[in-house]
Amino acid sequence: MSLIGFVYNSFVAEAPALIDSLIASLSLKDTSWVCSAEDLPGSDNLEDTKLVVVAGGDGTILKTIHVIAPYCIPIVAVNMGRVGFMSELRVEDAAERLPGYLNGDMRVERRMMLHATVTAEPGGPELLSAHALNDVVVGRGGVARLMNIATRVDGEPLTSYRSDAVVVSTATGSTGYALSAGAQIFFPQARVLIVQPVAAHTGLRDGLVLPDDSVVELEPVSRDPASLSVDGLADVDLAPGSVVKIVRSEHEALFLRSRPPAAFWGDLTSRLGLVYNLTPPRQ
């Protein structure tokens, strides 16, 4: 039996009630399961799931993608957060529009992900492995000062960034932390790796756009504490000499969309507050 999963943000008080109302209005009680984003890694229903409906913001979507991406399950999200870049539905029209997504009539949007691994030294055994939809960030730990981050691309030395951090982002992540650091915005289905320093002091300050088959290595060479962040969901301390290798993930994030790809640009301007009055003045 194919199931519909419902994942919600447990920190949004209205989310469980919304999920219950959607299941009741669509008569999905016997063919669905419900789980908070925090409890999703322990779910045993994913192999039989054909679609996941997410009620929350972009953080809830990221947590969900981390778990379901290996199962190639598409999602449709109801925005209950702030910006909602990846969301498709609003709370007020979710019940009316959701049947169209359940019936398989929508476009599947495939977005590239990243795979980050940590080793104690170049070429050493893996100590940590994680996948990201938005970005992988290597930056300073608890000390408020610049750090040096040696950066290699495909094994060749690029530069040693003297900065607060270095962000390696997907096109999806180009509207997140990378954007605040000065990176360009990319169409979300573009297959690129974006390398963007944060508050660079000297040396190379501009971001780079690399092919999706590139291998990026980041090595903090300062003696100060360093940390690794994957999609901004958790920080991991990096021991001195650690190397973070970032490549394209074998997984993809799948989103169901009702509108054509170009609708992204209208969403971009409205959700970033860049909408201007384009009505020509009266003569």
Image (spheres, rainbow, N blue to C red):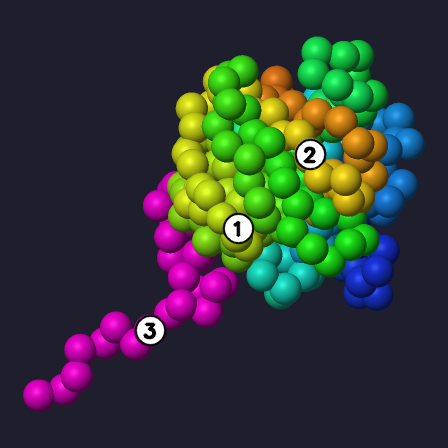
Q: Return the mark for residue 276.
A: 3
Residue 6: x, y in percent?
77, 43
Residue at point 70% right, 25% down? Answer: 243
Amino acid type of disc 2?
A: Val
Mark in front: 3 vs 1: 1
The residue identified by callout 2 is 221
Amino acid type of disc 1?
A: Ala
Amino acid type of disc 3?
A: Tyr
Residue 112: x, y in percent?
54, 29
- Indicate whether residue 260 is drawn in magenta: yes
The residue identified by callout 1 is 200
| In this picture, residue 134 sits left or right of residue 122 | left
Mark in front: 2 vs 3: 2
Range of residues picked out in magenta: 256-283
Residue at point 77% right, 40% down? Answer: 223
Whether tag 3 and tag 1 are in contact, CB under 8 A, the answer is no
Q: Quadrant of the C terminus?
A: bottom left
Residue at the far bottom in the pictured view: 283
Label 2 crowding class (10 Å Cα cut-off): few <14, some 14-19, many 20+?
some
Judge by depth and name the residue closer to the eye, 25 or 53: 53
